[in-house]
Image (cartoon, helix red, strand yellow):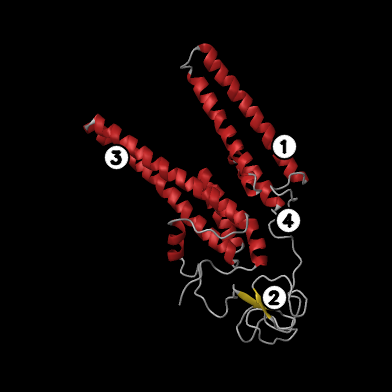
Amino acid sequence: MPKLSFPYASGEEIREGRLLAWLSYPGIIFGLLGLLFLVPMFAQKENPFTRYHARQGMLLFLASVLVTVFFWVVYGVILVPIIALSPVAGIVTAITGLVVITGIGITIFVFAIIGTVKAASGEFYRMPLIGTMAERWFPDMVPQTSSQIPRRDKMYCRNCGKELPAGAELCISCGVRPLNGNKFCQNCGAKTRPEQEVCLKCGTLLKREEKHEPLGRKNKLIALLLCLFLAPLGVHRYYMGRVGSGVAMLLLYFSIFVFLFMGSMRSFPEPVWIGLLVFGAFALVGYMVWWRIDLISIATGKMKDKQGRELSQVR
């Protein structure tokens, strides 16, 4: 029996799950804070969207731990005796190990950022290798297809039973919203009673019309938390679709360290290294001002996404 690409999660489950699912990834950037994946894993363990991201975040955290252990093994155990035997071989080993570990670390860092943004946006995301390993460790992570999993290609109007394309806003037969009824199952079209919660024919939970925020609007709480904890990376701006300014914020943050480090080395003529320190100080002040403006703008509801839409309130 073929498997689904991702576990099925209703719109309500995704909206609820993304409030915590994003915590599965960003802590990895800060070492042991990677254990934050335990929060969504246990707080919403019945939510398929949250569970998928939490398990993937756990595998990513374990990968980061293995990289750290490998680093200390190479530089603390292997490198010393190699240098004692041959300084040249020791230098080659050190450079090779540093390049490999740095590459793996950057990859994990990028995966953590992408995972955070995807989870916060309410999207499933399978990481290369990490996602595949997680699905093998947890066979139930992506269920087998069955009649109990809602169809994705079509649906039925719950008011008149007319077959419609999946996601239809209005029924072309009776004119009402497809889920604004209680006479038929939206998954198989079987007749139902008003008091039923589950279809007796296909086992699908019977859905009813829900009032919720328009699709695509970004959540204010998520944007605020991303700005509070991951502002140096510009993640909160990526989340709101402002990729260009997010990259600019990231570059500004790293320029602080570049200018201050180069200036503190004093390897250049005095006017040059003093100028580097001054540029570093200005970059630091500029970043802090920008960060506070973003934080206040999000908290007060003045910041909008790329499409000019206001951020949605916490649900």
Q: Residues within 10 Å of mark 3 (few under 14, many from 20)?
A: some
Disc 2 is placed on an element classified as: loop
Residue 76 visible in rendering: no
Residue located beneath label 2 in the image? 207
Which amino acid type is shown beneath numbered disc 1?
Ile
**First in sequence: mark 2 or mark 4?**
2
Q: Distance between the residues labelled 3 and 1?
A: 49 Å
Q: Residues within 10 Å of mark 1 (few under 14, many from 20)?
A: few
- Front: mark 4 or 1: 1
Residue located beneath label 3 in the image? 78
Residue located beneath label 1 in the image? 293
Q: 81 or 54, which is in the foreground?
A: 54
Q: In which quarter of the image is residue 123?
A: bottom right
**First in sequence: mark 4 or mark 1?**
1
Q: 26 or 250, which is in the foreground?
A: 250
Which amino acid type is shown beneath numbered disc 2?
Lys
Residue 180 rendering spot, x and y as whole percentages: 76, 76
Residue 64 rendering spot, x and y as whole percentages: 45, 48
- Front: mark 2 or 3: 2
**First in sequence: mark 2 or mark 3?**
3
The residue at the point 34 percent across, 39 percent down is: 97
Looking at the rendered structure, which numbered label has been put on residue 314?
4
Q: How far apart are marks 1 and 2 (CA)?
A: 42 Å
**First in sequence: mark 3 or mark 1?**
3
Q: Distance between the residues labelled 2 and 4?
A: 23 Å
